[in-house]
Image: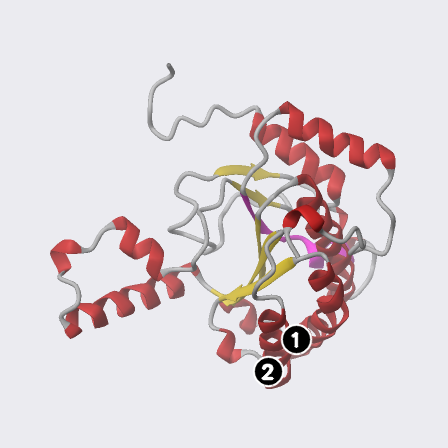
């Protein structure tokens, strides 16, 4: 299945409205659609507490935002979407919450696998996924294998992820090549480092929900030239209309990459 013959099946279970399709078309006419969007999905716990609920309620509602944003990104023409799903620091949260998150991850992959595949979306992961529960890891690997040849959009889940961990792994890989004699230290380039990291283009737009002004150890090398968009909206309330606002903001930026105006 090619991108031109993508099934119109909805990820959210809702048919796309004519108004939404028109808004997406207007965004495409308005300017450049980011090739790669990365999102720090923050605010699930605060969203739940504000409503008198347990934190896990916010995580469950956050899954609905994931479904809507994945669908909207694919529809509008984003080619790569990377979601900061679970950091290495998150393992330090209360055991009950971590267990609930792992069960939610397993359930979500099982529930969404067929719809993602039908919509020609490729699923990938980055991070120290060996630390995931075996059941979740098996489900994740099976889903990624099934969708390996899909081409409409690549959805990457950052799981048990740390930017510093990823860079450390890349340095170890390059050091091994030096030790094997296939690479010399003086010949190491920025491209070599990028290739040793996750195999995907650098993000054009980094979105952080929840209002915090930090990057939280996420894609430290890759976001060197990303445009940053921070919103006070908690992740469970971040849906496609908020995504469109972020894309419009991106389109209004003057991306010079260190150069002067021409």
Residue 43 in the magenta stretch? The answer is yes
Image quadrant in which you'd find residue 78: top right
**What crowding class fits label 2: few (fewer than 14 Cα within 10 Å), some (14-19), or many (20 or more)?**
few
Task: Give residue 150's position: percent from left, percent from top.
Answer: 61, 60
Is residue 162 or residue 240 the one in the foreground?
240
User: Which circle marks residue 1 in the picture?
Assistant: none
Task: Give residue 188's position: percent from left, percent from top.
Answer: 20, 55
Is residue 233 or residue 29 the one in the foreground?
29
Task: Give residue 207's position: percent from left, percent from top.
Answer: 58, 43
User: Which circle marks residue 102 in the picture?
Assistant: 1
**What crowding class fits label 1: few (fewer than 14 Cα within 10 Å), some (14-19), or many (20 or more)?**
some
Q: Which structural element holds mark 1?
A: helix
Q: Which structural element holds mark 2?
A: loop
Magenta segment boundaries in residue numbering: 36-48
Is residue 131 visible in the rendered structure shown here? yes
Tally of numbered discs: 2
Is 36 situated left or right of 100 in this image?
left
Is 159 situated left or right of 64 in this image?
left
- The residue carrying mark 2 is 133
Mark 2 and mark 1 lie on one chain; the one further toward the N terminus is: 1
Name the residue located 56 percent from the left edge and 38 percent from the top edge.
Answer: 34
Contact flag, marks 2 and 1 (Cβ < 8 Å): yes
Residue 47 in the magenta stretch? The answer is yes
């Amino acid at each position: 299945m090619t991108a031109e013959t993508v099934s119109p099946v909805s990820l959210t279970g809702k048919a796309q409205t004519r108004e939404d399709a028109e808004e997406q078309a207007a965004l495409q006419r308005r300017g450049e659609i980011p090739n790669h969007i990365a999102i720090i999905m923050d605010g699930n716990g605060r969203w739940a507490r504000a409503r008198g609920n347990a934190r896990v309620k916010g995580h469950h509602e956050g899954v609905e935002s994931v479904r809507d944003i994945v669908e909207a990104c694919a529809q509008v023409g984003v080619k790569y979407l990377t979601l900061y799903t679970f950091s290495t620091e998150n393992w330090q949260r209360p055991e009950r919450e971590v267990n609930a998150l792992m069960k939610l991850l397993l359930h979500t992959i099982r529930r969404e696998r067929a719809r993602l595949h039908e919509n020609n979306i490729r699923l990938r992961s980055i991070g120290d996924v060996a630390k995931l529960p075996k059941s979740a890891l098996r489900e994740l690997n099976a889903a990624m294998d099934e969708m390996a040849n899909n081409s409409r959009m690549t959805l990457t889940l950052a799981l048990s992820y740390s930017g510093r961990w990823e860079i450390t792994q890349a340095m170890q890989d390059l050091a091994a090549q030096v030790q094997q004699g296939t690479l010399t230290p003086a010949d190491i380039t920025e491209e070599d480092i990028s290739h040793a990291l996750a195999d995907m283009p650098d993000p054009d737009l980094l979105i952080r929900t929840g209002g915090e002004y930090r990057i939280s150890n996420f894609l430290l090398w890759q976001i060197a030239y990303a445009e940053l968009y921070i919103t006070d909206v908690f992740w469970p309330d971040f849906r496609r209309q908020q995504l469109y606002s972020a894309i419009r903001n991106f389109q209004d930026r003057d991306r010079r990459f260190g150069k002067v105006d021409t």
